[in-house]
Image (cartoon, grey):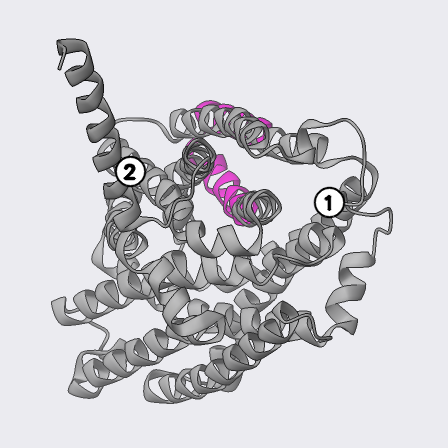
Amino acid sequence: MSQHARGSEGVEQSTARTAHGWRSFVDLRPGEGVSLIASGLYFFLVLGSYYTLRPVREAVGIERGYDNLPWLMTATLGAMLLVNPLFAWLVSRVPRRVFIPATHRFFATNVVLMGGMFLLLDDHARVWLGYVFYVWLSVFNLFVISLFWAFMTDAWGREAGGRLFGAIGVGGTLGAMAGAAFTQHLARDLHTGVLMLASAVLLECGVWAMRWVARARGSIITSSARSEREPGPGMLAGLRLVVTSRYFALICLYMLVFTTTQTFVYLEQGRIVEAAYPDRAARTAAFASLDFWTNTLTLLVQLFLTGRLIRWLGIGGTLCIMPAVTLLGFVALWLVGSRGEGAGSGEVTRTVFLTLFVFQVVRRSSQYAVARPTRELLFTGVSPDARYKAKTAIDTFVYRAGDMMGAWLPGVLGLAGGALGMVAGGLCLGWMGVAGGVGAMRKRLDSGRNI
């Protein structure tokens, strides 16, 4: 055999081994590799942009005490009320090839403007600008990530999405880890405004990655012609679907319980971090550390478990994982509190902090690696109005409505300590029932029956 032939045979064997190695993690089919890489890069840039700023948001949110968080969440819901109709109007009038990049660039421009203001304003003004930034970023992250996943369901569909959404999520996880690590190590050395400018650059790069995905998947987004795959002209079509469809109503209920229980934990996190860390830079670094370890665990789950869990448990069973993890976390917090180390003691002990830290890492990684990609599969095989209007309303307005409920409910009902844990536990049990109902309706949809 000639040296050239032996060399060619070696390359083929190496390629085969590489493909086999990838298939041990990902159920990849011929012709999907470039699209998968492009999708992962798009998500890397989007979440890298967000996670560069997320620790800054968490720190400024408790600048004057964590008691301000319910008010900030209420302001965020009000902002969603204003932004959602404007977004629905945009979606109803322009094709996806226009409104997706336009949305990204609108937020990137906002980042640049606020970054400049943080650089120029004095410390007193920065506190109030920080509150505006908190609300703005809480709107930004939901819209941009919701649009990403809507585009992914368009580009991949139900069958390929079930196989590859977990792998695509790996790109986002790596971006989140990179953004969190960047901010964690440089928060004390770089001005907040510089971090914002870096985030804007990543978001603009994400627009170009999105166009690469569109070309690789042959999506209609690269065409100037409208088609049946574009959202229709009805500005209220998405809200109408949410109100009239039992399927989307159950998804709304799932989201409400998820965000309500999530906010219970989030407020406790704010209280503990405020007490444990003395200044904004230290708190920013602590939040970045939490984000880093969350995304490390998320990456491991995405590589080894996400696709398998969806195949083994189905959509309904996989959706039940998140409420089960949340229930166990609340039980752990209750056990720590029952030993006199909880919120009522007035002291932040190492046990309290570590318990909450582990709970948040496991809960959030379950959300990102398992619940989120599974939930996105619920929007495959539905109409463009459902995908770009109803989905966006659920992912933004309904999400923030749950945040507000979770922020105010403990104070309104006078819940604290064990009582709050019991309410949260009851919500988690109901949440599991809703997850099972959504999974059953999805099975009917996949089998071609009416829902």
Q: Quadrant of the C terminus?
A: bottom right
Q: Position of residue 105 (x, y in %)?
A: 61, 28
SS for tag 1? Answer: helix
Can residue 99 be found in the magenta stretch? no
In the orientation shown, which residue stands out farthest toward the front? Answer: 1
Picture quarter containing residue 320?
bottom left
Residue 115 forms part of the magenta stretch = yes
Looking at the image, is 356 positioned above or below residue 40?
A: below
Q: What stretch of residues is rendered in magenta?
A: 109-138
Q: Is residue 211 left or right of residue 264?
A: right
Label 2 Cα neighbours within 10 Å, binned few <14 / some 14-19 / many ≥20:
some
| Residue at 80% over, 39% down | 227
221 to the left or right of 176: right
Q: Quadrant of the N terminus?
A: top left
The percent coordinates of residue 438 (x first, y second) are 57, 75
Which residue is at a point 34% across and 36% down the rendered structure image?
A: 179
Q: Which mark is residue 19?
A: 2
Marks 2/1: CA distance? Answer: 41 Å
Residue holding disc 1: 87
Viewer-side residue, 154 vs 240: 154
Residue 284 point in image, percent of width and height: 30, 44
Q: Is residue 267 visible?
A: no
- Is 103 left, or right, of 323 in this rendering? right
Q: Three-letter amino acid code at disc 2?
A: Ala
Q: Residues within 10 Å of mark 1 (few under 14, many from 20)?
A: some
Is residue 145 placed above or below 329 in the rendered structure?
Answer: above
